[in-house]
Image: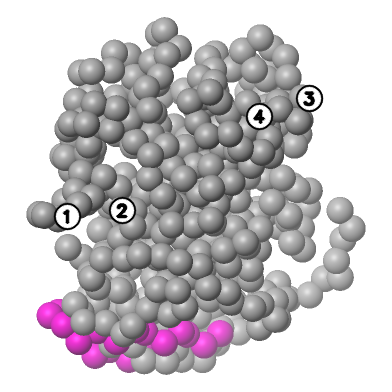
């Protein structure tokens, strides 16, 4: 791509944001609390060790500031959303831009403990969407000009023992999977085992170029990775709505899928470039604990009904209609059963991410929906007509400091990385604005939407 003149990235983001036009998309929500917004500051404040939410050092933010490293020339914080219910307390957000205290103070926010608010909140904005609940300080975290275009899905694998945290990223053209590690300032390709430039993907026969759009992992510690693809780029006019299983521990510069579940004939017909954009794995333990309904049997989900399905259900999102479908994938026979279909709340869904700590399924739309996200959960409300099924708990606007970019990837970090009650989320942009494709912001740790 053509390089743009060097300038302050934060300034350009601000200009793009001012120029953006916010359009309405529809969303439904429950009556739970909206997290208060914390004041943030610091110009691209540093991050120590594992990736954390990035902002200036906080001094008594109303909803708990997000910690960062040293910095200067801080920006003013964002107003907190008032909460007047139980547990809410006043707290002026006096935010400095890092150790140098160069930032101006954030405006005051009324809230309770970090990441929480009272039960009575201000009304939602356009189309029922609420302000972004995190730090609202978006920063780029990939080396400039690393990805020219078409970076799509993301998945965060937390650190385990001596193994570092990994940010998996998938690209649809050319079809590649990247294993990214944190080097103290950016996420860079693993230099070992053939990962330095990403690994080229193929279908199980060793041929083709999967239009790879989403990536996820099953049980933590497993080397198995799962990629959603909508077609073979070498046969671009034909849909091939598939989930590919790959062995992330394989050596070499290419990865040939060890199994393919071709779901095309079980799903509504869609355009060849409007298929499976998203994938997330949800463990059986969560589904059973919530009373998840298996629509194929019209009864409570029983994992014992699905041999060799990998201890969880794979949920895939469709770009063309915004629907999400859940599948039990047989890892021995290659068969599958669709156990659920539900709306994401968007006209199209670009990525899915399951927060294993909070139990939330995040559904993300790109610039066609103004970068909004919906948080879904299994309905446990007594008497509800959707009890046992996924429903939309809350819809959020994109972070205030995020321009309306073509973000096709999204993932959530684990609560083990929390700082001051917040943890990082990552976005992958298809277009690499100003040479950057991966950006970070934050959300509150734990279940923050209330009951």
Q: Earlier in the sequence, mark 4 or mark 3?
A: 3
Secondary structure mostly seen in magenta is loop
Q: Residue at x 50, y 80 (%)?
A: 41
Q: Residue drawn 61% across and 37% down?
A: 270
User: Does 414 sit left or right of 430 as displayed?
Assistant: left
Specify whether residue 140 is in view.
no
The picture places residue 140, in percent across and down from the top left corner, at: 63, 61
Q: Magenta part of the protein: which range? A: 75-94
Return the disc, 1 or 2, that comes first in the chain's sequence.
1
Per the image, the residue denoted by label 4 is 239
Q: Which residue lies under the disc numbered 1?
A: 384
Q: Secondary structure at mark 3?
A: helix
* Secondary structure type for disc 4: strand
* C-alpha span from label 2 to label 4: 28 Å
Task: List the residue tagged with mark 2.
Answer: 391
Q: Nearer the viewer, mark 4 or mark 3?
A: 4
Mark number, residue 234: 3
Query: Mark on residue 114?
Result: none
In primary-sequence order, the first of circles 1 and 4 is: 4
């Amino acid at each position: 791509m053509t390089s743009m003149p060097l300038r302050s990235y934060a300034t350009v983001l601000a200009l793009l944001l001012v120029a953006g036009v916010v359009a309405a998309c529809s969303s439904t929500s429950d009556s739970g609390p909206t997290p208060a917004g914390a004041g943030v500051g610091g110009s691209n404040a540093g991050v120590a060790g594992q990736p954390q939410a990035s902002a200036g050092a906080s001094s008594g933010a109303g909803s708990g500031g997000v910690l960062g490293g040293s910095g200067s020339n801080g920006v003013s914080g964002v107003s907190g959303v008032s909460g007047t219910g139980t547990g809410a307390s006043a707290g002026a957000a006096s935010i400095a831009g890092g150790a140098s205290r160069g930032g101006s103070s954030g405006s005051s926010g009324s809230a309770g403990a970090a990441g929480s608010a009272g039960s009575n909140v201000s009304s939602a904005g356009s189309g029922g969407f609420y302000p972004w609940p995190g730090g609202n300080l978006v920063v780029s975290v990939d080396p400039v000009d690393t990805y020219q275009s078409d970076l799509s899905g993301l998945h965060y694998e937390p650190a385990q023992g001596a193994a570092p945290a990994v940010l998996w990223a998938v690209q649809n053209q050319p079809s590649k999977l990247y294993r990214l590690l944190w080097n103290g300032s950016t996420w860079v390709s693993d230099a070992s085992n053939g990962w330095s430039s990403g690994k080229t993907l193929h279908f199980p026969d060793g041929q083709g170029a999967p239009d790879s759009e989403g990536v996820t992992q099953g049980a933590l510690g497993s080397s198995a990775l799962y990629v959603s693809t909508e077609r073979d780029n070498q046969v671009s006019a034909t849909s091939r709505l598939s989930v590919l299983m790959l062995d992330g521990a394989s050596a070499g510069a290419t990865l040939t899928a060890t199994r393919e579940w071709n779901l095309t004939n079980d799903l509504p017909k869609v355009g060849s470039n409007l298929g499976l954009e998203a994938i997330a794995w949800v463990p059986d333990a969560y589904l059973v604990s919530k009373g998840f309904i298996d629509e194929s049997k019209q009864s409570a989900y029983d994992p014992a009904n699905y041999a060799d399905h990998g201890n969880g259900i794979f949920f895939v999102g469709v770009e063309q209609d915004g629907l999400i479908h859940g599948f039990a994938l047989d890892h021995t026979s290659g068969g599958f059963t669709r156990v659920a279909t539900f709306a994401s709340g968007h006209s199209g869904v670009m990525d899915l991410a399951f927060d294993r700590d909070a139990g939330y399924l995040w559904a993300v739309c790109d610039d066609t929906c103004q970068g909004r996200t919906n948080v879904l959960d299994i309905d446990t409300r007594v008497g509800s007509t959707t009890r046992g099924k996924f429903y939309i708990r809350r819809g959020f606007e994109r972070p205030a400091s995020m321009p309306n970019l073509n973000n096709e990837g999204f993932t959530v970090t684990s609560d083990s990385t929390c700082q001051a009650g917040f943890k990082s989320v990552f976005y992958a942009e298809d277009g690499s604005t100003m040479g950057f494709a991966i950006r970070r912001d934050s959300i509150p740790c734990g279940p923050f939407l209330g009951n």
